[in-house]
Image (cartoon, grey):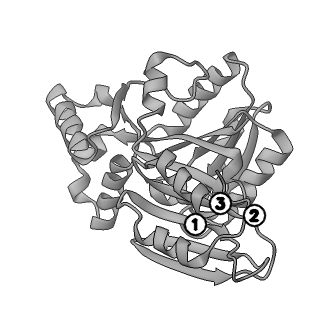
Amino acid sequence: MKTELYIIGGFLGSGKTTLLLKLLQKEKEAGRKVAVLMNEIGALSVDSALIGEKTAVRDMLNGCICCTIKDEIEVELLALYREHQPDVVYIETTGAAHPMEVLDACMSPSIAMKIDVKGILTLVDCARWVERNRLPIAHRKLMEDQARWSDIVALTKTDLVAEETLAVVRRDIRSLNQKVQLIEITHGEGEVVFGSGSQSQEQHHARHHLHVRTFAYEFVNHVPRAAFRKWVEHLPDSVLRIKGFIKFEDSGDQPELFQYAYGVPFFQPQPIKRPTVIVVIGEELPEEEMRKELNKLEGVF
């Protein structure tokens, strides 16, 4: 049984921790074992103290998941999995985190076979959104990217803006992300079909129409290098990123690191044993077709 993974993002003050506490309460009521990975920029975590003693919590301090401590998330997720065997892990990111970078950090080949990414949720402060053009361009672009790459966008503090303003926010976000599920939260209250443990029709639909999909593939055999390169050359544009370790027929038991981004492949021999797993990240991935192609590539039928 894989551990479900949910990513919660949004700028500082948008209400992430309030929402997280409500989601954790729903998980408790559903009888599921929960773990939380919290990322703070600063030397002290305040929010983890609010969550309670019965939930396994890991703090990642003095850095952002998507930059200075990106590599650490693999270690922390592995530790949570090994020590607690949770049914579900929630990651609450800093406001400075880019959702695609966070997703990439979570999908380490070392843990990808144990993780099932269920979605990315971003909280958007409506008042701050309509004033985003006053922000530095990098901050404005990040705010828009957080909405662009999310499966669910929760509009917060909706009671503090006029209905006309709220309509503008909705239109803006849908122009960036046509597939997004928009919900509204007032005073921390709102229906979030996101990791509640129930298997409602709405939740089932949302989980099978994620904006960005991921899957992990584990090799059981060595792979012909030329055939693999040819496969890479014909990848669809929907594939955004691949990373992992592969043993090729001409390299014996020496695994090679393989990375693919923006259409460019990269290979590098590894001096130590690695799991022969690759992780694929993309939009509307033809997962079944890609798995069949990889099976054929390594002679598994």
Q: Which mark is residue 299?
A: 3
Front tag of 1 and 3: 3
The image shows residue 153 at horizontal and vertical percentages of: 37, 37
Q: Nearer the viewer, mark 3 or mark 2?
A: 3
Viewer-nearest residue: 155 or 102? 102
Q: Residue at 33% across / 37% down in the picture?
A: 180
Q: Nearer the viewer, residue 42 or 220?
A: 220
- Looking at marks 1 and 3 on the same chain, the residue that comes earlier in the sequence is marked by 1
Residue at the location (47% across, 73% down)? 230
Label 3 with label 2: CB-CB less than 8 Å:
no
Residue at numbered disc 2: 275
> Quick one: label 3, few (<14), some, or many (20+) residues within 10 Å?
few
Instruction: Please tell me which residue is depicted at 58% across the width and 23% down the height of the picture.
Output: 196
The quarter holding residue 172 reads top left
Q: Residue furthest right?
A: 83
- State which tag comes first along the sequence, 2 or 1: 1
Q: Is residue 125 visible?
A: yes
- Is residue 13 left or right of 128 when viewed as pictured? right
Q: Nearer the viewer, residue 75 or 117?
A: 117
From mark 1 to mark 3, how far is it between C-alphas? 21 Å
Where is residue 105 shown, x and y percent of the image? 59, 60
Position above or below: 267 against 261: below
Figure quadrant of the N terminus:
top right
Numbered disc 3: secondary structure: loop
Residue type, numbered disc 3? Gly
Amino acid type of the residue tagged 2 in the rendering:
Pro
The residue tagged 1 is 243
**Disc 3 and disc 2: Cα gap in Å?**
19 Å
| Label 1: few (<14), some (14–19) or many (≥20) C-alpha neighbours in 10 Å | many
Classify mark 1: helix, strand or loop. strand
Q: Amino acid at mark 1?
A: Lys
